[in-house]
Amino acid sequence: MAKGGGVGSFQDEMPAAVKCELIDEDLGSSSIDFFERDLASYPDDIQKEVRRRVEYIHWVEKHLIGGWTQKNLDPLLAKAMTEINYPPPKWRALAEWWSVYSVSGKMLSSLIPKLHRKGNRKRKVTNEASFFDRAVERFLVPERPSISAVYQYYSDLICLENQKLVGDKIQALSYKGFYNRIKKLPAYDVAVARHGKYLADMKFNKIDAHLPPSRVLEKVEIDHSPLDLILLDDELDIPLGRPYLTLLIDQYSKSIVGFHLGFKEPSYYSVMKAILNAIKPKTDIAE
């Protein structure tokens, strides 16, 4: 499992034979190899093929004089098929089996066919992806665990699952590949899950869509503006200053429903006077 010093490491609690094969998402290379499996742990068809190969190798090895060439092997294969209850291979296949078998120190595992590994890429990716999804669920929580802690959880899930598998093992991402995938998650969704919607909206300055009003006086806007006028006192002939106009405008009809005109800067007083003007009857204006 995790090496010493890693977050949440429990290497002493797991048997040494339980190791995960880490595949770097960028490099695509193995960093840890599996220990050799016992032949009995493979499916029956694979065990049968290994027996076929080893029987032909042993029989030909006893009777062969010279090299493993077509001239020497073809006559021996014709004789071997009468004594061995398995169909004979081609001479070239037999020569390749012998080459691999002898180089490995005559280990049975070297004769295990690799064809059973073909066609499994999609299944492996799907299996690995399901464990990654479970790790993402662990990552997107208010407790906000670190990426390294979630990666340890992800690796442990795959290693525990691999103990139950007899065939090919599930290939886990390396930490770098896992980290890159986490960083590709939508940033806003991650912030909402780990920090809450309020802080996420503040961080990303999210603005909801504006809903227009559907009737009169449903929504009224208020605004202040200094006028481009300077009033003069009629008697003293001195400037009084620029007045401020406060308007209440109905958003649906765009009509002015109230106003206030004064020399004080916009404040609670000017808003109050404008609202009172909008509420009170305006019979004098109607006349």
Image: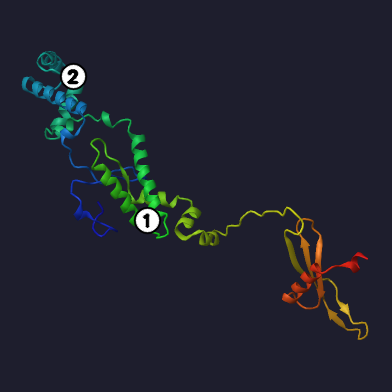
Q: Quadrant of residue 98?
A: top left
Figure check: 1 above or below 73? below
Q: Is residue 52 above or below residue 266?
A: above
Q: Give the labeled residue for mark 2.
A: 91
Placement of the C terminus among the 4 image quadrants: bottom right
For the image shown, how many numbered marks are present on the structure? 2
Query: In the depicted view, which residue is nearer to us: 117 or 9?
Result: 9
Mark 2 is on which residue type?
A: Trp
Q: Earlier in the sequence, mark 1 or mark 2?
A: 2
Q: Classify mark 1: residues with Cα within 10 Å, few (<14), some (14-19) or many (20+).
A: some
Instruction: Work out whether residue 15 or residue 275 is closer to the camera in this orientation and state it.
Output: 275
Within 10 Å of disc 2 (Cα), the crowding (few <14, some 14-19, many 20+) is some
Q: Which color scheme did the rendering employ for the protein? A: rainbow
Viewer-nearest residue: 197 or 265 = 197
Compared to residue 204, the image places residue 241 above or below, namely below
Q: Secondary structure at mark 2?
A: helix
Residue type at tag 1: Ile
Q: Position of residue 254 (x, y in %)?
A: 79, 58
In screen coordinates, is 228 left or right of 197?
Answer: right
Q: Residue at x 26, y 28 (%)?
A: 115
Q: Mark number for residue 43? A: none
Residue at the (25%, 60%) spot, across then down = 5
**Mark 1: secondary structure:** helix
> Are the residues at dot 1 and dot 2 in contact (C-beta closer than 8 Å)?
no
Q: Quadrant of residue 68?
A: top left
Q: Which residue is mark 1?
A: 147
Mark 1 or 2, closer to the camera:
1
Q: In the displayed image of the protein, which residue is found farthest to the left?
A: 62
* Residue 26 screen position, x and y as percent: 37, 45
Whole-percent x, y for residue 114 in the image = 25, 30
Q: Which of 201/78 is in front?
A: 201
Rendering coords of residue 66 (x, y %): 9, 21
